[in-house]
Image (tube, coloured by chain):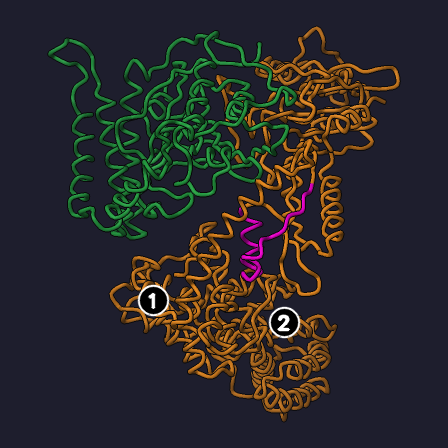
Amino acid sequence: MSQMQPSGGQTGANPAPRSFQEVILRLQAYWAAKGCAILQPYDMEVGAGTFHPATTLRSLGSKPWAAAYVQPSRRPTDGRYGTNPNRLQHYYQYQVIIKPSPPDLQDLYLGSLMAIGLDPALHDIRFVEDDWESPTLGAWGLGWEVWCDGMEVSQFTYFQQVGGHDCRPVSGELTYGLERLAMYVLGIDHVMTMPFNDPDSPIPLTYADIFRQTEEEYSRHNFDGADTAQLLRHFEDAEAECDRLLAFPADDPKSGKRIIMAHPAYDQCIKASHLFNLLDARGVISVTERQAYIGRVRALAKKCADAFRLTEAGADVAEDAGAHISGVAQ
Amino acid sequence: MPDLLIELFSEEIPARMQARAREDLKKLVTDGLVGAGLTYAHAASFSTPRRLTLGIEGLTAESRAVREERKGPATTAPAAALEGFLRSTGLTLDQLERRADKKGEVWFAVIEKPGRRAPDIIAEVLEATIRNFPWPKSMRWGNGALRWVRPLHSILCLLSDEAGHEVVPLTLDGITAANTTRGHRFLSPDAFSVTSFEDYAAKLKRAHVILDAAQRESAIWAEAQTLAFASGLEVVEDRALLAEVAGLVEWPVPLLGRIADDFLHLPPEVLQTSMREHQKFFSVRNPKTARIEGFVTVANTVTADHGQTILNGNQKVLTARLSDAKFFWENDLRVAKAGMAEWAEGLKSVTFHNKLGSQADRIARIAALAREIAPLVGADPDMADRAASLAKLDLRSAMVGEFPELQGTMGRYYALAAGEPEAVANAARDHYSPLGPTDAVSTDPVSVAVALADKIDTLTGFWAINEKPTGSKDPFALRRAALGVIRLVLENVVRVDLRDVHVSADMLFPEAIKVGEWVPEDANRNYNSLLAFFHDRLKVFLKDQNIRHDVIDACLAMPGNDDLTLLVKRATALQATLQTEDGANLVAGFTRANNILTQAEEKDGVEYSYGADPKFAETDAERALFAALDTAEASIKPAMAQEDFTSAMAAMATLRAPIDAFFTATQINADNPIIRRNRLNLLSRIRSICLSVADLTKLDG
């Protein structure tokens, strides 16, 4: 594993990035250099980077793990037809997940802020209590929201439980809200005016060039277009399918191997969660029903976590003391 | 005498947990040390976001040796007894002594517990403290099993005296205690070693850490005021925010910013709430106009540009927040000026509780009930109805959606914008109060009517569906609602029959939802149950005002106990009477009379209530008692009719001397059955006169 450069204030941070994608690319390069596997987004609609199986499922069991990735995230209720300066129904999160959490995770994190041009010698960076809980995933952890000059730029969490299972060892999770962070670094007031690629490119593209129309289309879809009867049916289908997949015997007669379909089942859990979010945006779920739906998604998440723990990737294995990421010599 | 320094260095400790944690650290460690035989002169604990620190002065260097002698069984006792004694003392037979005793020879154990060195004791106590620390929430990290509030990085544990210093040897889940710590995360990140508490505090200060939260608080407050004063402004005091901010910084640097002109017209509560909740900013106001015009943010670092970048960033975040707030305010005002019909309509689809209907249903019930309560509290019924219909509409406003704590406050602004009279608008704000035992109670009759209707509707509704508080569970805050009713009634001296109001409230709910103790053929059961709940809350409330539990019981047993004002008036008078010598002794006399009478009635199978006749009186004391009872009764009856409990009880207390004299001079169980019956009937008069005032049988002897 590579060594992190000392992060003393005097050395100064990198020059400011010039575009949204440069912020992303620098984070990718930084975490790659720290030894994380740079994964690609999960190919399904999710509400947050945490839903990616690289986080939810891989935080279970004892096998060491280190991954970083961009995850497009959808929050149907946050749609504002592209007019709000910082609210979007589709946005990007940058997610880092490392198991076991290294002792210098805070320093590693601060290094990533330096990498995108936020110099702690000029800014006020603070770790402010914020306990994280995902009722739909049956997960919780303790940590902070990280403030830069009074603005929340990341969520920093030590996972304690996922899918109802205690996390042993504990994973450290970092989540950056990319648009907001990039807007701050680039000095942009409205997300739609943010340069997506370099403004000096032959064909400069802003965030609006890429996403204004889709924000409009999806806002209308989420609030008025989506067929609620169909969504309800799909929710039931996903729920049933998840159960059905998990009911298969572990031994696969065709390959002769033991194959538990934890990931395909978890896909159905992700689907159910997104369908619930859409139903919520359509305003057809009452306050009391809400809890019941969340409980149903949580039940799926727990079953998938149970199943994953029975697989090779989710099992407990003998400790490999040497394998962990750290920027500070031990 | 050495001094002890302990520092537990971790990742950022939540600000709200620090005060409690430093107290716990001090208590657990000092209790542990004292329990193990050490003594100390003085202890003080400190906290910053990244450390908990304890300094102990004048600790004894070792615990005293203890010599204990224990007598065992006789040397002739069976082997089992001897074995038990050896087990309990941890000695072997050859270590026991034979000693002569009165009854013969017995075994004696002499147990020598040598003194232990302080470092050994400290290591043990500190390890137990860390492992059992009562954090409200704790966590594991990495591969470890240790729990702490956030990952624990290092332990500093140092004993020092004039001769030098030594690290207390301790290793805990891979963390070995040392004499080193670190300064400020960004300004002085390097590790350094210390030799004593003084050295530690001084070096920390050089490393940009103010150890003492109280010092950080006063530094923040002083600097914030100076900054504001220099601009002709003043900081709005907020103790809770100050304590919280002091827990977020090791090296506080207050910075003063201005609120952009665009936002200055927002209500001050909106500015303050937005800045405090989201940004942890202090509000800064213009002392001449009382308008909020600026803020103080407290950074945790010094920068080359004197905080300009930090201030710009904070200003930008605030502008975004206030733009939202302004957008909400302007939209809300549009709806308000149009009469708020849009919100009333919207609340039809907001569920209050799935069995108790929508918020709109609830508002309609409260309005109907407020109309009924209005005459009892001196409010105009139409106005109370109107106020109740509008009071909760702001729940649907965008501003309250964003800042739930502004409910009511916004309601008042919006009602005024809608052109409603002041009393109606104030009810929107004030009908939520009182929210706690010390919160102010509204006094405006319209607000009182709406507040009572709101709380009684809530209580009646949850009683109807049998969702009562149990043990520590009170998810709908029904205890607080009942206490609110009690305080509204008592502090406004409202005369209201709670049972009647409860019955009215109950009729506003559909029959179909009613379950539990509510049975149509015996509606009283549910009413009694809620009344009993009120009485329980009343007891708790009056206990805080030092009114005795049994005094309340004595008054609760009287008719009219669903009129709380009457009940408390009676209880207050009774308590005062019992504090006089006559009053206290009267109760003894009453109890004696009552006991004798009750026994006789049981034995004879009759009730002695025919009225005693003075012509059968034999002794002077007996005749005097007749006269005294006549006199007392003559004043008690009219006094009671006027609810003048003080006079009635004063008259009752005058019976003390005649009753005592009567018991001294007279034997009740006279041989002559006529005399005996007459005397028992006389006791019965004492009983009935006393019981007409309060049920004295409920008083503790």
Q: Is residue B264 magenta?
A: yes
Please tell me whether mark 2 sits on a helix, a strand or a loop.
helix
Q: Colour of chain A?
A: green
Residue B26 percent coordinates (x, y): 70, 33
Q: Which mark is residue B342?
A: 1
Task: Report whether residue B106 is seen.
Answer: no
Q: Residue furthest left?
A: A254
Q: Which residue is mark 2?
A: B592
Asked whether, in this view, residue A284 is left or right of residue B216, the answer is left
Q: Which chain is orange?
A: B
Instruction: Name the amino acid type tagged 2.
Output: Arg
Q: Earlier in the sequence, mark 2 or mark 1?
A: 1
Q: Nearer the viewer, residue A226 or B426?
A: A226
Chain ID, mark 1: B
**As drawn, B602 above or below B242:** below
Query: Within 10 Å of the Cα at label 2, are there few (<14), some (14-19), or many (20+) other Cα atoms?
Result: some
Q: Which residues are magenta?
A: B254-278
Q: CA distance from mark 2 to mark 1?
A: 69 Å
Identify the image quadrant of residue A231.
top left
Task: Report whether residue B310 is seen.
Answer: yes
**As drawn, A57 above or below B673:** above
Q: Is residue B551 magenta?
A: no
**As drawn, B265 above or below A174:** below
Q: Nearer the viewer, residue A217 or A67?
A: A217
